Image: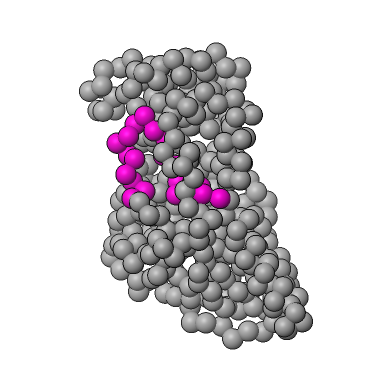
């Protein structure tokens, strides 16, 4: 676990950057980011009385190579962060415990944030010195590599700030994360067009996934770890330091596409209970799995796909037809596409 302190307004410059990002339309259909931009620009816009920010980082470093399933096309690949328990609950529980202690000891006011509120955790964490934003836009730590969940406590206390981290010093000329992106989603260092990102497409995007990105998705059915997994700083990450709540559940580490395509809504909810994956709903999961099945080259998946070809949801029905068409093509033609 990592913890650091910063002035509440220490990351205000990042607010200008996110304005430019939104104006360029790089947020895609994530309208909630645009609708609360006025709060996101600075923590003081959310809570004017805040004087300090306490940033908390919690490791979820994996014990296995996140890219190991790339060639196992009969399986679905789920992002490391979503293979265990829901990080919102675990991180918020830790922040609330710290907040209660702080309020009792110092008699201060405070507010706790974990991802669901318009607080820019990554710039604040960098300002608090617990890591720096890599060229892939995620936080990187000397101790935990690219694998950290973040939370923030805003407080009325005037705390001594830590020395900010400087991303320019630590990433240097390395561009492995940018080069690894399957869909070339990076506009440049520290800038991503979410509309091209597989994590956005499989999680946030509601509707048909553009055909130009489907082949690049491979067997990724929830998120994508490629840009994180190739970061050289991960060689310093100690998987033993990861919170045990984030250890992968057996059924989520390497799920079979055929099993996922057989789920109904009740079975989906049961399988993903306590997981952040439950949020996307069964329709997006089936859509994602159909695209992965179409990319598999595995004719044994045809019956699993066919059961969705007449789905009343046009997005699912179209994805099924696309998958069947892909499996009907010669293998050499698929690999060349």
Give me the residue at 33% from left, 59% from top: 231
Residue sitting at the far bottom: 160
Q: Which residues are magenta?
A: 65-85
Give me the residue at 50% from left, 61% from top: 243
Residue 283's place in the image compared with 59, above or below, is above
Tell me residue 271's x, y (percent): 57, 36
Is 58 on the left-hand or right-hand side of 211? right
Residue 208 in sight here: no
Tell whether position 74 is magenta.
yes
Tell me residue 70's x, y (percent): 32, 39
Query: In this view of the protein, which residue sits in the foreground, 59 or 158?
Result: 59
Q: How is the image coloured?
A: one colour
Residue 134's place in the image compared with 209, above or below, is below
Q: Quadrant of the C terminus?
A: top left
Query: In this view of the protein, which residue sits in the foreground, 97 or 228?
Result: 97
Residue 232's place in the image compared with 26, above or below, is below
Tell whether position 265 is magenta.
no
Give me the residue at 50% from left, 25% from top: 261
């Amino acid at each position: 676990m990592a913890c650091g302190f910063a002035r509440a307004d220490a990351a205000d410059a990042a607010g200008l950057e996110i304005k430019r990002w939104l104006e360029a339309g790089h947020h895609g259909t994530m309208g909630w980011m645009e609708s609360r931009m006025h709060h996101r620009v600075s923590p003081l816009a959310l809570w004017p009385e805040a004087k300090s920010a306490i940033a908390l980082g919690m490791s979820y470093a994996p014990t296995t190579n996140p890219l190991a399933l790339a060639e196992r096309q009969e399986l679905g690949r789920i992002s490391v962060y979503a293979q265990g328990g829901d990080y919102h609950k675990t991180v918020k529980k830790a922040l609330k415990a710290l907040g209660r202690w702080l309020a009792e000891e110092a008699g201060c006011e405070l507010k706790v944030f974990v991802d669901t509120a318009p607080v820019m955790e990554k710039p604040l964490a960098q300002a608090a010195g617990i890591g720096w934003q890599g060229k892939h836009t995620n936080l990187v730590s000397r101790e935990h590599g690219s694998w950290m969940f973040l939370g923030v406590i805003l407080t009325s206390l005037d705390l001594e700030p830590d020395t900010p981290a400087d991303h320019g010093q630590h990433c240097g000329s390395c561009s492995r994360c940018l080069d690894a992106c399957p869909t070339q989603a990076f506009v440049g260092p520290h800038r991503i067009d979410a509309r091209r990102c597989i994590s956005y497409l499989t999680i946030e995007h509601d509707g048909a996934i553009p055909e130009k990105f489907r082949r690049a998705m491979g067997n990724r059915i929830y998120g994508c770890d490629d840009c994180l997994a190739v970061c050289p700083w991960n060689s310093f990450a100690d998987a033993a330091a990861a919170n045990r709540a984030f250890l992968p559940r057996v059924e989520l580490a390497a799920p079979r596409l055929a099993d996922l395509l057989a789920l109904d809504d009740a079975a989906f909810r049961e399988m993903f209970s306590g997981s952040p994956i439950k949020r996307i709903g069964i329709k997006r999961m089936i859509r994602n799995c159909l695209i992965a099945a179409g990319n598999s080259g595995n004719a044994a998946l045809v019956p699993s796909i066919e059961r969705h070809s007449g789905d009343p949801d046009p997005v699912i029905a179209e994805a099924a037809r696309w998958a069947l068409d892909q499996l009907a093509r010669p293998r050499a033609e698929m690999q060349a596409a």
